Image (cartoon, rainbow, N blue to C red):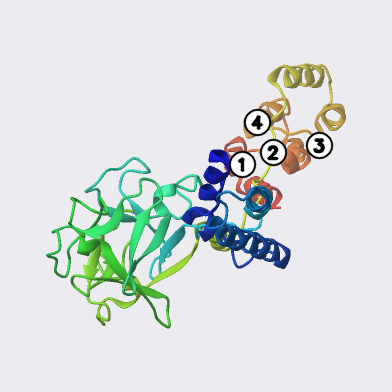
Amino acid sequence: MRRSVALIALALSPAALAFRPPPEAPPSLVERFDGVQADLEAIKGLLGALKGKPPLLAEARSRLERALAELEGLENDTRGTAAPPPPPPPPLAFMNASSGLCLGVVGNDRHRAGDGVELAPCLGERGQRPIDQQWNVVPAGDGLSTVRNQATGLCLGVRGVDRATVGAEAEVYDCGAAPGDPRLDNQWKVVDTERGVQVRNRVTGLCLSVRDGDRHGPGAVAVLDECDAPRRGRDSTWGTAPYASLVPVIVERVIERAPPVRPEPPPPPRPIAQAELDKVLKTVDSQSFGEDKLRVLKLALAGKPVSVAQVKAVIGEFSFSSEKLEVVRMLNPTIVDRENRFQLLELFTFDSEKRELEGIISQ
């Protein structure tokens, strides 16, 4: 009897009576729950008549055991029906409309409360995708948000603890500095405009901007400024997008702006080795007539790269100007240091010879 009463008390406890499948549960589970509730209601009606009446007690016990078993089955079947919580929104990149640089934190992913905020290349210096340029916009109520840095969870704020004017520097700081301190300067209103978004500070109404107007590069300091100051232009306007989706866009822009890659010219040919030239000169020197010497040169050096110094050495094997000019005419196409060909003029005496030499080397 005591066990039956204990079971009844358990089944009629507020937790059991309050159980109900979630709205998105299948209709069959809801029907099963309604059946359990019917059994529990019947048990409640039998409670007053249990004393001294075993048949009623047996019926109550049977209904109770069935209701408890069904409750356990309902709990198991309902666990998988609840919709999973939506994933958190991906971190955003804030790209400055004036420079195309991204909002980051001084310190390259290693920073602490009070560190400044600056512009930096959106992919880092070596394309490492730094997480200090990734931000989570977290609703804070009344249309306001905190802008939390992905690297440390610190919030975008303003130096001065709720007292700031035009030119005040932005920083990252604890989202709540102390118990009961709301850190109002860490709250922002992200407002859509025709050119992008403006990030307006709750305390001052000023906008997140960049020092030095529209002329800034990596390392430029983020500050507060008038949201629509005509002298500032687009540096108070930001483009926002999930950082992961922004990476291909940035890469494409980098490729578009990069100068065309031109193949490097091949290195200039090196003149023949001096040992090879010495063999040729030895053979030339063994010939008695200039015609034979020229024949050896044609067979040995035609088409081979030579330097001006080597050409001068070959010319020294000939006595007549006409033969010397013929040597130049033969070797001129393959001279590698063509800027030095003027040195050949010193090997000729008469103006007529020099003019003819000039005609040869100018080709």
Mark 4: which secondary structure? helix
Q: Position of residue 351 (x, y in %)?
A: 60, 48
Would you say 60 lies left or right of 44 here?
Answer: right
Circle nearer the viewer, 1 or 3: 3
Residue 195 x/y as whole percent: 42, 79
Between 336 and 12, the one nearer to me in the picture: 12
Residue depicted at x 44% and y 60%: 93
Q: Which of the labelled discs sits on residue 341, or is there none?
A: 1
Residue at position x 38%, y 43% from top?
109
The CA span between labels 1 and 4 is 10 Å
> Counting residues from the N terminus, which is met first, the one under dot 1 or under dot 3?
3
- On residue 312, the disc is 4
Kindly identify the amino acid type of the residue bearing the numbered disc 2: Ile
**Element at label 2:** loop
Looking at the figure, which quarter contains the N terminus? top right
Label 4 close to label 3 by CB (< 8 Å): no
Few, some or many C-alpha atoms within 10 Å of disc 2 (few <14, some 14-19, many ≥20)? Answer: many
Report how far apart the C-alphas of labels 4 and 3 lie in the structure: 17 Å
| Tag 2 residue | 335
